[in-house]
Amino acid sequence: MATLVPPPTTPPPAPAAEAVKPEKVDYMDLPCPIPYEEIHREAMMSLKPDHFEGMRVDFTKGLNQKFSLSHSIVMGPMEVPSQSAETIKIPTANYEFGANFIDPKLMLFGRVYTDGRLSARVKCDLSENLIMKANAQLTNEPHMSHGMFNFDYKGTDYRTQFQLGNGNLLGASYIQSVTPHLSLGGEVFWTGQHRKSGIGYAARYNTDKMVASGQIANTGMVALSYVQKVSEKVSLASDLMYNYMSRDVTASFGYDYILRQCRLRGKIDSNGCTSAFLEERLNMGLNFLLSAEIDHKKKDYKFGFGLTVGE
Amino acid sequence: MSSKVVLKAKGKSTKGSKPSDDNSTSKLLKEWSTWTIKKAKVITHYGFIPLIIIIGMNSDPKPSISQLLSPV
């Protein structure tokens, strides 16, 4: 019997050819964009490390893969808001106890201070695409506590978020990937207490080497940022914040060195403020922090040192 | 001429027209929701950290109480 000759199979397309020629953009298969509130993420991380003044020691003790307790001592001058142009600082010492529980589906983060304040964060994955986050700062003083709930839905190439906060705060935001490198988004919010509502737009363009993002809101805020990754270890960032209602503008330039044993971030501001932040890994689980912020205009000099023990 | 003294009985001031049912239910709802939010705030304030500790102590591998309390 004559065997059927199988039809000649087409050879599989050579995978190397795809990398050589520019990829044809598949608009149905765009990557998921960054969440709307993190649109300036790289610039924020490089230009705004958390500077502190005085001494701080953080000790994190892990009891489990998922559960850890933390003890933290902060001693230093704290700024007190005052009517005069001078900044008034009062030396304070605070102890803070915290507990964290980190699970792929549920994350709980709580911190309680010696003055009775509680700061709590909850992140819960209700389903694969729906995430609920809650954030609260509770104090013993009446009317000084706030809380906020966020519901995030992640689609294939878009994200939406709905926010609900105390003081009758409602907000919603949406961000969509338009090309593999560009994503555009918008947000609306409404505060019941101050009877204000606002709408804002944001855009973010990123490649492997740079990230440029811009945001504009009808409250008068315009924020633009640009981060260039000069090499694996060095990146430079710049940021412009302009408020067209109050005609207030601030520009800052900074650098971020991520080296094997340390991370050094420094920046200079158009308000006459220069600052630097160093985190050095002395040993496994032992980090040394140095923070310096010099404000030449206000003549406010803040220097701090600290130690972080534990992962 | 005798002045007439008119004694006005001081009655309890009523809230104008009788309150309609809608007003009372929305008022009740507002009061009830304010009461729940106040209670929820107190419960969260005192109970959030113990809740995290209880959830953490029950996750596996189970840590022991001595690990919780010792400073090392």
Image (cartoon, coloured by chain):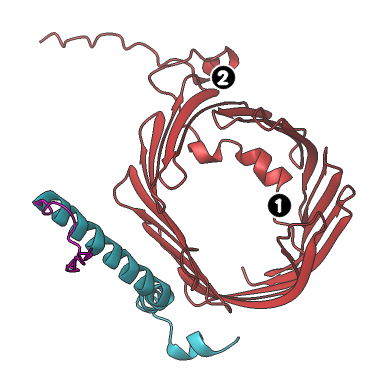
Let me know if marks 2 and 1 both belong to one chain. yes
Image-quadrant location for residue A20: top right
Q: Residue at x 52, y 15 (%)?
A: A23
For label 2, count other residues whose C-alpha is less than 10 Å away and answer few (under 14), some (14-19) or many (20+).
Answer: few
Q: Disc 1 sits on a residue from what chain?
A: A
In the foreground, A248 or B53: A248
| Main SS class of the magenta portion in the image | loop
Q: Check the image and report above or below for B43 versus A198.
A: below
The magenta span reads: B1-20
* Rendered location of residue A225, percent (x, y): 68, 31
The image quadrant where one finds the N terminus of chain A is: top left
In the foreground, A228 or B12: B12
**Colour cyan maps to chain:** B
Q: Check the image and report above or below for A136 versus A96.
A: above
**Colour red maps to chain:** A
From the image, tell me which residue sits under label 2: A19
* Rendered location of residue A115, percent (x, y): 57, 77
Q: Check if residue B12 falls in the magenta segment.
A: yes
Q: Check the image and report above or below for A254 versus A179.
A: below
Image-quadrant location for residue A130: top left
Badge 1 amino acid: Pro
* Rendered location of residue A299, percent (x, y): 89, 54
Q: Residue at x 13, y 54 (%)?
A: B19
Q: Residue furthest front?
A: B1
Q: Check the image and report above or below for B63 versus A239.
A: below
From the image, tell me which residue sits under label 1: A49
Label 2's element?
helix
